[in-house]
Amino acid sequence: MAAVTKTLGDLNDRSRRANEIERKLAEGQSVVELEADLIEPSFVQDRMEGDIDGLKASIREQGQQVPILVRPHPDQAGRYQVAFGHRRHRALRELELPVKAVVRALSDEELVIAQGQENNEREDLSFIEKARFAGRLRERFSREIIMSSLSIDKSTLSIMLQLVDALPLELIEAIGPAPGVGRPSWQQLSDLVAKTQDGGVDLVNHARSLAGLSSEERFKQTLAHLRPRRVERGLPDVMSTSDGGRLAQVKNSKSKLEITIDKKATPAFAAFVLNQLPALFEAHEAANQRKKEA
């Protein structure tokens, strides 16, 4: 219980620090009310869409406590772009309420630095959201600007960019932010995707089929879908298709490995496996020969 209390206290402290930063940024600036429809998100998306029902309920009960930071739209007179406060803007727009905002002239570089640093102080972007944000910033900004925005060093940035380059964007979006999943797990997924024959296309479809689960659970299920199955000795194991259909039963003993395919359920597959056995053995022998020659 003490650990939970400490964690909640840490979260509250970070939230208070982030609010204080925003208030300091607003010092000497007038807070104005703007129509939500006149405000657009930043030109670089930093977070994936998520649930904001809790935030909407809070605003409905207590109002908007902290203004967002916007800049005049660089191309459209009378409109604005968000530097930080995207979730508040979205909640207020859905509630059809005006937005309290500080309007400040910001360059593109100043906007993305303010956007990234505010999120870092709150620590509410997941690892993959930060990596995805870094990948998008790379299209327009130097690595120095990206590191300043995300408050990371050069090696961390390199790791993030390597991961988003290795993983299909469609797969990242299908899984979602996965807030409890860190770099090692995403790296493991990336390594397994690299071994697939289709570059992860089938995996994208699998992840999309898990839309009813939480983002973290979608990640776990997607990773499990790629991991090689291990069959313990003496214990029968049922192998299934991606849609849950029974494929085969496998039993591994000290002297033999038995694979039992239900010919009534999948007669064509049973015949296919039988016909492929000689070719599989030849491929196995060829692989062994290459190892000996290496």
Image: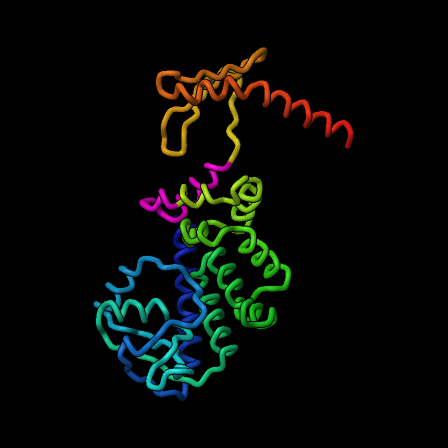
Residue 40 x %, y % = 35, 74
Residue that appears at 45% across and 69% down: 44
Visual colour scheme:
rainbow
Task: Locate residue 153 relative to residue 37 in the image: left or right.
Answer: right
Assess whether residue 221 is covered by the magenta stretch.
Answer: yes
Residue drawn at (51%, 42%), measured in percent from left and top? 198
Q: Residue at x 56, y 19 (%)?
A: 277
Q: Nearer the viewer, residue 199 or 137?
A: 199
Question: Can you tell which quarter of the image residue 67 is in?
Answer: bottom left
The residues colored magenta run: 208-226
Residue at image coords 76%, 27%: 292
Asked if one can make out residue 109 in the rendered structure from this viewpoint, the answer is yes
Considering only vertical position in the picture, is 278 above or below 172? Answer: above
Q: Position of residue 209 (x, y in %)?
A: 36, 42
**Residue 179 can be seen in this image:** no
Quadrant in the rendering for residue 154:
bottom right
Q: How many marks?
A: 0
The x, y position of residue 75, in whole percent, is 41, 82
Assign the C terminus to one quadrant of the image: top right
Q: Is residue 85 above or below residue 50?
A: below
Quarter of the rendering containing residue 92 = bottom left
**Residue 29 on image: x %, y %:** 39, 87
Along the horizontal axis of the image, is 294 left or right of 11? right
Q: Nearer the viewer, residue 285 or 55?
A: 285
Does residue 206 belong to the magenta stretch? no
Q: What predominant SS class does the magenta segment belong to?
A: helix
146 relative to 181, above or below? below
The residue at the far top in this view is 255
